[in-house]
Image (cartoon, helix red, strand yellow):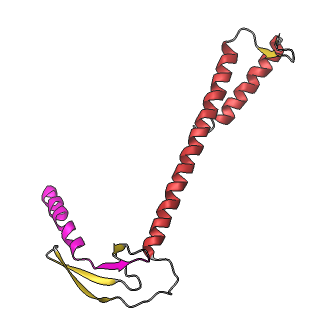
Amino acid sequence: MRRTTAIAILICLPLSAALADVFRSVDAQGHVQYSDTPTPGAELVRMTNGRVPIRSAPVASTAKPNTVSSGDQVHQQLEQEAAARAVQNDVAQTRADQCKKATDAYNASVQARRIYKTGPDGQHEFLTDDEADKQRTTYKMQMDSACQGQ
């Protein structure tokens, strides 16, 4: 029973879309645009049997002359959403890289027998055990901060 109902719904969905009003307009650059919302100067186009369009009179202008069309608004909104997703992906990637670097530094400090820092002359200056423990604690705190929420 459920299967039959689902099939009936799926068959009827394209038919309901075919009965919707379609508006045809030409933008300033001469591009033809079709939309389900009327814009100033758009023609109402109805489909007969889903094949041959029948045009009717142009839609009366209801908007101010210099307003942005709904198609442009949708395009701008889609561009903004795509840019926001790109920023989120970049931020997530940067955070993941920072977390990995901090984790690598911490793990290296824990696995190392002795920790050193490079002196002004380029020589290794080994830290005392207390200094090494403080450095490991610092690396641990940096790792926790960088990896927070991951």
Residue 92 seen in this snapshot: yes
Q: Residue at x 66, y 35 (%)?
A: 146
The answer to if 59 sits in the magenta stretch is no
Part of the protein shown in magenta = 1-28
Residue 97 image position (x, y, % from top left): 60, 33
Q: Is residue 131 left or right of residue 15?
A: right
- Whether 57 is drawn above or below 11: the answer is below
User: Tag count in the figure?
Assistant: 0
| Depth order, front residue of 116/50 | 50
- Whether 42 is drawn above or below 120: the answer is below
Residue 124, quarter of the rendered image = top right
Residue 118, quarter of the rendered image = top right
Q: Residue at x 14, y 63 (%)?
A: 8
Q: Is residue 14 left or right of residue 36?
A: left
Residue 126 seen in this snapshot: no
Residue 29 image position (x, y, % from top left): 43, 74
Residue 36 image position (x, y, % from top left): 33, 76
Q: Quadrant of the N terminus?
A: bottom left
Magenta portion: prevailing SS class: helix
Give the residue furthest to the top: 113
Residue 148 image position (x, y, % from top left): 63, 37
